[in-house]
Amino acid sequence: MYQVYVNQAGYYPGEKKMAVICQPAEHFAVEDMQGNICYYGKWEVFGLDELSQDTVYQGDFSDFQVPGRYVIRCDQGVSASFEIGTHVYDKLMYDVMRAFYFLRCGCALEEKHAGVYTHDACHTGMAAEWENHDVKKRILGGWHDAGDYGRYVTPGAVAVAQLLYAFMFFPDVFVNLELNIPETGNHLPDILNECKWELDWLLQMQREDGAVYHKLTTARHAPFVMSEEDKEQLYLLPITTIAAADFAAVCALASRVYRAYDVAYANTLLFAAQKTYRWLEENPYFISAQNPRGCGTGGYGERDDLSNRYWAAAEMFATTGEQTFFDQVVRLRKLPFPRLALGWGEVAGMGQMALLTSKFPVGKGMLEMIRSEIIQEAERLQKVADGCGYRAAMTEYDYVWGSNMPLMHHGMTMIVADWLENGDRFRACMLEQLHVLMGVNAMGISYVTGNGEYAYNNPHLRPAYADGIDACMPGMVSGGPNRHPGDAVAREYIKPGTPPMKSYIDHYGSYSMNEITIYWNSPVVFVLAAIMHQA
């Protein structure tokens, strides 16, 4: 482990660059890979960082802008190597996007696309309705949601939506980004090809009456075997209003995005969204997600469906401009739910993005209200980062299962705030959230597999364990530190009283700290797109 913490992916030449060390130190040097000293700097005392309990010293080397590969060295230690240049995030973006391909279900991954990470087609059998086993359907495709082989509507909708908004806000980053997936070279940018794999599966999860099944899983999580070895019976788990609302929202959003490329597909998506929205109106009461007796796969339950219905209404209005959807937005805004959350459990923040980007008039009063909420939140987050020696905009309560999700969501909020102000007031702080993810943290670890000299490598991810390959497939984002160890492995290794930022272990058995999910990758894509767009 390195003693000096840096963003192990690297830095753009003109951006802020800061290293961290956690022991008394005065000076540091930036050295090239031949050992030549290229820049001298001075460590500045930050003091005690509460959430790591480290005494932090910060080293600012923003003035050094010469492209190349370097380390930071001082008497107390050395950093991992990192790059300064204009393409430092190209590989990271490629990998975090390619991770979705590695999680594809229902198809074989061939060597020409997957390299050494091949496997045969999986989960191609008939699925039975849980409530009536006589009803069977063959539903193929989609992404494995996380470390297990389940496929879930609500997190899938959130992940797709965040990728689509990344494309909408920053299309220049993606139009020429080829991912070496089977569809590369067709009429769609590859980010839309990958999203379509999940959208096509989501469309199959809609019932004839417009209701939407909550998930497609086996009765229990599979053991740590390859996906094609998971032969247990597949089940369609009962309908919920949260699945329906998120389905309607993402299909409406996708219909706007795909219309420029495939009108027929856009119409299919919009028709599906309208059908499910009608079902939602006919079923105004919350239908929750609860595992029925005998099922032990991911629940993805929520306390209500208010933010989900809000997101659906906002996307339907942004797509159609129909007044009835806007009336629902206005009605729902009067009810109590978090306004800016970006998923998966609360999703109103994506409803705000729909309204902000709508080509149909929303009204100055509502736009100003949304604008004020987002900018005030960005200002709050910046103050939180100011109080952290590592510059993480994270409170103690953010260090939960999947803490790298709020870390990246905070970056997304700052991006949208800058977009609203047509400025860059929050850009430096937003960049620092990526720096935290990539190594400027109390563990000194990169939380993205295959990216950085000291990147984690043992996720709670069945194929990563079962494939027998030492190096994990690249681009998988770890859940990260969790102040409440929630599994036996974590409780064994993490002692009581461990500071939140250090409550982490790189172990495949720790699902509460080291699992991966599609909706932890998607906000990283959004943040990287903003950084690469503005560079």
Image: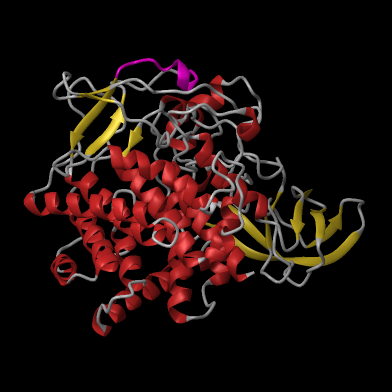
User: Residue 509, relative to residue 43: is it above or below?
Assistant: above
Q: Position of residue 393 (x, y in %)?
A: 48, 61
Residue 241 in the image: above or below residue 267:
above
Task: Decide whether residue 450 is among the magenta residues.
Answer: no
The one nearer the camera, 349 or 354, is: 354
Q: Residue at x 59, y 28 (%)?
A: 110
Q: Residue at x 21, y 41 (%)?
A: 212
Q: Which residues are magenta?
A: 224-233
Residue 527 position (above or below residue 519): below
Name the side, left or right, on which 51 lies relative to 301. Answer: right
Which residue: 47% across, 28% down? 107
Residue 357 visible to the viewer: yes
Residue situated furthest bottom in the rendering: 364
* Left or right: residue 97 compared with residue 73: left
Which image quadrant: the N terminus? top right
Q: Is residue 225 magenta?
A: yes
Q: Residue furthest front?
A: 264
- Residue 41: percent from left, percent from top: 79, 67
Q: Main secondary structure of the magenta part?
A: loop
Residue 104: x and y, percent? Answer: 47, 34
- Provide residue 168's location: percent of width, then percent of height: 45, 64
Question: Left or right of 302: which side holds 384?
Answer: right
Q: How is the image coloured?
A: secondary structure
Q: Is residue 289 left or right of residue 21?
A: left
Question: Where, quadrant-wise, is the C terminus in this rendering?
Answer: bottom right
